[in-house]
């Protein structure tokens, strides 16, 4: 692959080659094919135009596809859809091969019933964890990992008139969560934010300030609402160290920090309000799962700080040990290889290696 390509473009080309070769995606040839006539070849060949699958179910690891879709449906979780997705719906996963939600499911869902495997993952994030617990806020198909997790009650002022929160949409949620026990018997939640090819400045995107976004004709309407919603929570936060009289234009309202800020507040509020929550914990550690090769996310010099992602975010935290970046392959490094060889081969071919 060309080194000057972005990580996202490299992975897109990688997936297109897998599609063309009939690998990984159950032979799915991708949507919107076009005819390419090569030199000295009058017949030409069909190539997929976009990294979108004909059947979005083929985007999931085959051994989990049916159950993962059922799990989302039974627990009223909304799938995320990306630009270009044409088959959308509450129980329809994204057909986009670069989806980070799909990447999260493909890495973690096959292990969620295996206590030893999940414990090995938790220990990669915090070595002091000695046990993992079943997550009973999943009313159906509960395991040791839960997906698109929200609080039982809205503690972040994100709904009106105490409306019920919906997992995966219109409120702060975490891509996945592990619930564990520490050596001192304290319970700990591990909110997991999964990134794959995301960045927030490439292909004509700007570094969007969520504190000044308009709502229709109302100047800065959405931005003002967000400032009103989160400012007091930030002021009261023990983990968020950057305090200001006015958070307008602050680092907390630029991605990826806007998302990290909300998830930090979410974890703190889960603990502060544990009496009213199904999951009761005394501590948390925020896990950010990012491929090392995604330099556009990790090493970009963010205008709001003129620093990289990790350095920027850690400068906003009181305790940097409560935030940890782990690459996907390392996260699963200690699972039983003999038990999961087929699964590891799938992840290696699809996510961890370049196409050969």
Image (spheres, helix red, strand yellow):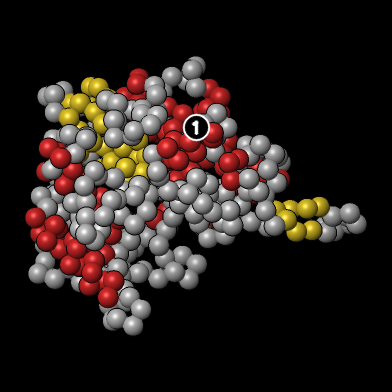
Q: What element carries label 1?
A: helix
Give how far across and how far down residue 280 sits, in percent.
Answer: 17, 34
Q: Nearer the viewer, residue 50 or 150?
A: 150
Q: How many labels does the image show?
A: 1
Residue visible at 83% across and 59% down in the picture? 37
Q: From the viewer's perspective, is 144 left or right of 189?
A: right
Residue 303, given in percent of the width and then of the height, sits at 31, 68
Other-residue count near label 1 (Cα within 10 Å), few / some / many at <14 / 14–19 / ≥20? few
Residue 167 on image: x %, y %: 35, 47
Q: Report whether residue 352 is seen.
A: no
- The residue at the point 15 percent across, 54 percent down is 240
Q: Observer-nearest residue: 93 or 52?
A: 93
Q: Relative to 18, say whether 143 is above or below.
A: above
Quadrant of residue 208 within the rendered picture: bottom left
Which residue, given by chain and number where applicable, does mark 1 sit on? 67
Tell me the quarter of the image containing the C terminus. Answer: top right
* Residue at (9, 69) in percent of width and height: 245
Does residue 94 appear to the left or right of 195 in the view shown?
right
Image vertical order of residue 37 relative to residue 76, above or below: below
| Vertical position of residue 265 compared to residue 258: above or below | above
Residue 173 at x, y percent in the picture: 31, 48
Q: Which of 281 and 205 is in front in this view?
A: 281
């Amino acid at each position: 692959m060309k080194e000057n390509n972005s990580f996202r473009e490299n992975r897109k080309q990688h997936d297109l080659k897998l599609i063309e070769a009939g690998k990984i995606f159950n032979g799915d040839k991708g949507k919107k094919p076009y005819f390419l006539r090569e030199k000295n070849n009058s017949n030409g060949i069909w190539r997929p135009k976009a990294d979108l699958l004909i059947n979005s179910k083929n985007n999931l690891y085959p051994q989990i596809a049916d159950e993962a879709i059922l799990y989302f449906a039974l627990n009223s979780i909304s799938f995320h859809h990306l630009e270009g997705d044409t088959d959308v719906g509450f129980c329809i996963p994204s057909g986009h091969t670069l989806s980070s939600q799909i990447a999260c499911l493909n890495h973690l869902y096959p292990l969620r019933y295996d206590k030893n495997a999940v414990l090995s993952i938790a220990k990669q994030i915090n070595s002091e964890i000695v046990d993992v617990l079943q997550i009973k806020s999943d009313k159906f198909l509960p395991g040791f990992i839960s997906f698109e997790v929200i609080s039982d009650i809205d503690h972040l002022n994100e709904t009106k008139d105490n409306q019920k929160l919906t997992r995966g949409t219109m409120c702060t949620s975490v891509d996945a969560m592990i619930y564990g026990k520490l050596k001192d018997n304290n319970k700990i939640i591990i909110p997991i934010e999964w990134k794959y090819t995301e960045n927030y400045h490439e292909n004509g995107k700007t570094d969007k300030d969520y504190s000044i976004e308009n709502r229709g004709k109302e100047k800065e309407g959405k931005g003002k609402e967000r400032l009103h919603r989160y400012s007091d929570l930030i002021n009261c936060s023990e983990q968020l160290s950057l305090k200001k009289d006015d958070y307008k234009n602050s680092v907390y309202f630029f991605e990826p920090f806007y998302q990290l800020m909300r998830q930090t507040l979410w974890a703190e509020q889960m603990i502060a309000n544990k009496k009213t929550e199904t999951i009761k914990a005394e501590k948390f550690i925020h896990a950010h799962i990012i491929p090392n090769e995604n330099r556009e996310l990790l090493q970009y010099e963010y205008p709001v700080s003129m620093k990289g992602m990790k350095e920027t975010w850690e400068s906003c935290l009181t305790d940097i040990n409560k935030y940890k970046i782990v690459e996907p392959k390392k996260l699963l490094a200690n699972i039983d290889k003999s038990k999961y060889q087929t699964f590891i081969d799938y992840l290696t071919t699809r996510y961890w290696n370049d196409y050969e």
